[in-house]
Image (spheres, rainbow, N blue to C red):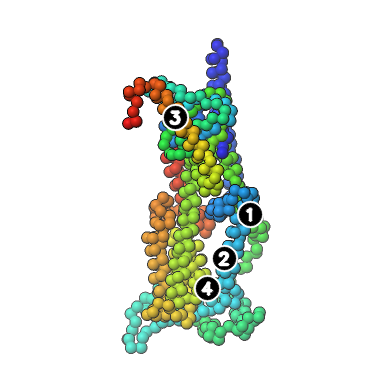
Amino acid sequence: MFERTYDVDESIFEEGQPGAALFLILDGKVAVEVLRETSTTRLAVLEKGAFFGEMALLDETPRSATARALEPTRTLALYRNDLNGLVHRDAKTACQIYRSLAGMIAERLRLTNELVQIKTPADDVGLG
Amino acid sequence: MSNGQDFEQVARERKTRRSVFHLAFAALTLLVGGLLIWKLSSLILPIVVGGLLAFVFRPVKERFRIRWLPHEVQVLCSFAAIGLVLFFAFNTLRKHIPDEEQKLEFKVRLKYKLNEKYQQLIAKPAEEKSNALAPLIEKELGPLMDKFNQSLELNPEERNLFLKYAAGYNGKPPIESKFVDYFRANQHTGKYVIPEKAPAGAGPQNAPAPAQPPAAGEGASLENKLSAWMLAPLIFIFLGFDNGQIRRFFIGLVPNRYFELSLTVVDRLDDAIGKYLRGTLTECFLVGLTLTVGLVLLGIPPGIAVAIGVVSGLLNAIPFVGTVLALVIGVGYALIAENVRPLIPGLNPNDLALYVVILVVITHVLDDVVFQPFVLGSAVNVHPLVVVIAIIGGSLLMGLWGMLFAIPTVVVVKTAVATFFKELKAYRII
């Protein structure tokens, strides 16, 4: 785990970059935003105890959003290959981390689905 | 000016100060680092060797990573395992390292056998009127044989010692009478090339060179070298006890913008170097094993075959040089070997040296065609011309050690540059 500190408005990672680590907020606030053509949409503001960038632990696809510190922020970063190494060294702990990751991703997916359902008329919602 | 503008101004000034500080600090670090490397150049090699050993043996440490075991105990267990394996390996090898008596015996046998083979080569068969090739061989090989004979010549002290061992000395049984006969025959070996007459007035050709006084500070230099090499095991031990602190420290120095990039680059580099080093060791092992099995099949005693296999396998880490040295050691032994009974039927024991040459060639081809692609893959392919230039450059800069470390250095630099540029592009920095 690596401790990192960020200044106000400092970018933690940017949309489109390859992701390599998950970040856990120890202190401060972080905005998760996406840039669409000319406007920036803020998806969430995360505070102490929250984590972000979790998809980087699961695959090597580029970051889907930008994370920016809104105030002086201290984070703890977990590097993907360190977690992969933990699977061999301490499978039980790694399993617990993956389990809680899966639970949180499921929770976020559920919230996103609810958001989509609220914003989209019922007839237009489809799985395809 | 509003409060917002003041804040922006202060933030901008702070950013500029930070950039200037970082640049100044980086320049100072480079300057001090460069000066230290230049002044302490004798320490570089021991540090690199210690670091590489720690790198190679890291999988052993990983094997002892048990959750309930304290880290220090895990490391001590891995050191104990490595120590035990090395102890048994050295103990086995030591039995086959020739002692004083065997060295003298080998010299005598090699000189005798070399001259015997040479005489057979240039001898004119009775039924033939003349051997057309003999003068050509004599002209080309004669000077070489003279040089061999000169280097294999026992000095008066060695001659006395051999005669003592021949009669049984230092609690050892007497040397076989056959080898004592070789020793006597060697005394009458003449020169194959007659030296040209020296011009009148010239001084004696073989006048002994005046004795050089011992260089001042020679002892101190040796002491310095020894104390520098003490660093290698220390580096190995400290890196062994490291639990990621060094990596965390250096990653901690990297600016936030390059944090994930540096993690990825360091990891890929670590992976590539680890694969290369362990792959090279496996390749050396396979080459050594092939040579050992081949030599045993040719009838060379297993102990000697293992010793030649181990030395040639280790030297195989130096491209080209390894094969040549394997050839020299193998053929050298084949020339002095006696009463050899090949396990492969139909082989003539008198042509053992030729079989050894064929074996070394087969091993080299196997290494190029099967071992290297299978073990190392194509990830660290280096152009043969780069290999040759790197080896020559390494030998010019640091002698034998330079030759040994030339290719790993090229691989490290190549992988580092390729990974660095690839990741810089992926992170849209360039």
**Marks 3 and 1, Cα distance to the nearest angstrom?**
49 Å
Q: Is residue B45 visible?
A: no
Dot label at residue B303: 4
Regarding mark 3 in the picture, which secondary structure is present there?
helix
Residue under numbered circle 1: B76
Q: Is residue B275 left or right of residue B24?
A: left
User: In x, y percent, where is residue B257?
Assistant: 50, 32
**Alpha carbon distance from label 2 to label 1:** 20 Å
- Residue B139 on image: x %, y %: 40, 75
Residue labelled with disc 3: A110
Q: Marks 1 and 2: in contact by CB < 8 Å?
A: no
Q: Tell me which amino acid carries mark 1.
A: Leu
Q: Nearer the viewer, residue A19 or B40?
A: A19
Residue B295 appears at what percent x and percent y? 45, 72
Q: Residues within 10 Å of mark 3 (few under 14, many from 20)?
A: few
Q: Chain of mark 1?
A: B
- The three-letter code of the residue at mark 4 reads Gly
Residue type (three-letter) at the residue carrying disc 2:
Ala
Disc 3 marks a residue whose amino acid type is Arg
Task: Tell me what residue is drawn at x 32 percent, y 86 percent.
Answer: B129
Residue B112 is left or right of residue B351, and the answer is right
Dot 4 or dot 1: first in sequence order is 1
Q: Position of residue B103 (x, y in %)?
A: 57, 75
